[in-house]
Image: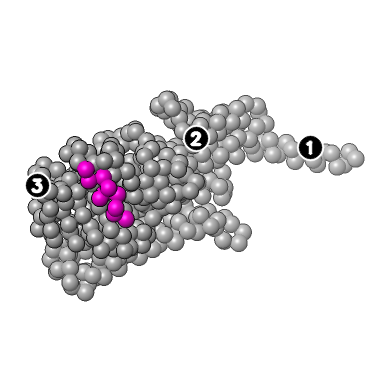
Amino acid sequence: MERVTKPLAGLFKVRQREAPGPAPYARSLRLCGEHLAAQEPGATGPQVRLTRAIGAFAASLDGPAADPFDALLQAGERALEVGGEHGLGLALGLAESAAGIRQRSKGAWRLRGLALDGLGRGGEAMECYGRYVALLPDGRPAPEVARRMHTLRRRRECLEAAVALFPEDGSELRGLLEEPTATTAVLAPRFAAYVRARVAGHGAGDPAVRRLLALYGDYRRLVERAGTPDPPHDGVTPVDVSGLRDLLSGLSVCVVSNAADVAGSTLGAEIDGYDLVVRCDTFRIRARGTGERTGLHAVSLRGDAPWQGPAWTRRAGIRLVFGDPAAGWRRAVRERLVPGAQDHVADASLRRPLGDPALLGEDGWGPAPTTAFTVLRLLDFLDASPRLDLVGFTLPGRLRPREAEWVLEHAAHVDHSKMRIALR
């Protein structure tokens, strides 16, 4: 028995010597403390889970034989769930510490890759994913990482193919592709500018331009899909452009103004007679004038912190949320949707339809077009509805001057007595 216990005792001592003490974890603990100190009251579920994970990590540092490595990685995973610049930044910091402590840790390299990926640093993320895969016995990454690697490769292929279409014009974009630290935040607007310039210079009918627009659409979907939240609540189905077109197919549609003269009218029954009634932003219902049904609610995010606005509690079959940048849009969708208040919510591919070259790609509408015009222009572009009307927009001032000009130029009929503009 003594022969067995002595080797085991020696093994335990070796493991204790290999397990690092608290010192290598000091930076990680400081990062966690700074993150908690910056939090505002009213933490959500992911933040609560992160706080608990940080507490477990701090507690694991007590004791000479303690090995808090797993607790460190767990805190990093919870930081990933929080997301946003601060959550992902914390996850990256913890992953860097973990990789420094154990350079052959699969979990550390995986966490580091996912954090960099979320921050838009795709080239660096691919390098970390490669380190993670190289440490796997069978070289087969987890499904989540495999999907992300595939997405990053496809995004780069789109960019490279776009540059190859107009090699004489793509030097700036090509130069960015050669920079390993170029972020999506830099590449995406440069790619959009490149597309607009080629459309302006060669015309939308040019075969190479059509191919370029298709590549740009694929790229945008690959970028946006990575940041689009999963169904935010049970029973909510995200819809993309084609999904929205399918939902609208064959329906008569009416976009209703929030103006007082509509509420004071007697148009309610006629409005409710459309297959789909569209209302915008903050609206009030007065059944006799506005009708009672809401098939689609469109809302534009405004301000620097749009996620702090009131929750979208009014029932609507479809909810469209317009907004930029993507991070603010994602957070607002995550925090302002209410379970049971909608059946479908538009995904990130529909968050800025007017300026997106993959959809309308139109300039000149200003930085904050009205919600009514944005949704109307999108519905007209999708061309899925045999009847598309505006109610309450016949008077000046209901739309921006250029928006009103576009509507009147494309109107098939205007009925001032019913405050109706028909586009079909």
Q: Nearer the viewer, residue 5 or 34?
A: 34
Q: Mark 2, residues whose alpha carbon is within 10 Å: few (<14), some, or many (≥20)? A: few
How far separated are the C-alphas under marks 3 and 2?
44 Å
In this image, 420 relative to 303: left or right?
left
Q: Which residue in the protein does label 2 denote? A: 45
Q: Nearer the viewer, residue 221 or 188?
A: 221
First of labels 2, 1 by sequence position: 1
Membership of 264 in magenta stretch: no
First of labels 3, 1 by sequence position: 1
Please report the residue visible at 19 percent of the width from the left and 51 percent of the height from the top.
Answer: 390
- The image quadrant where one finds the N terminus is top right
Q: Position of residue 226 (x, y in %)?
A: 40, 53
Q: Amino acid at mark 2?
A: Gly
Local SS, label 3:
helix
Residue 383, above or below 417:
below
First of labels 3, 2 by sequence position: 2
Please report the residue visible at 65 percent of the width from the left and 39 percent of the height from the top.
Answer: 18
Q: Please indicate, yes or no, whether residue 280 appears anywhere in the rendered image.
A: no
In this image, 272 relative to 54: left or right?
left
Q: Nearer the viewer, mark 3 or mark 2?
A: 3
Q: In the image, which residues are magenta? A: 266-275
Q: Nearer the viewer, residue 414 or 49?
A: 414
Local SS, label 2:
helix
Q: Which residue in the protein does label 1 denote? A: 9
How far separated are the C-alphas under marks 3 and 1?
83 Å
Residue 51, above or below 280:
above
Q: Amino acid at mark 1?
A: Ala
Q: Which residue in the protein does label 3 denote? A: 401
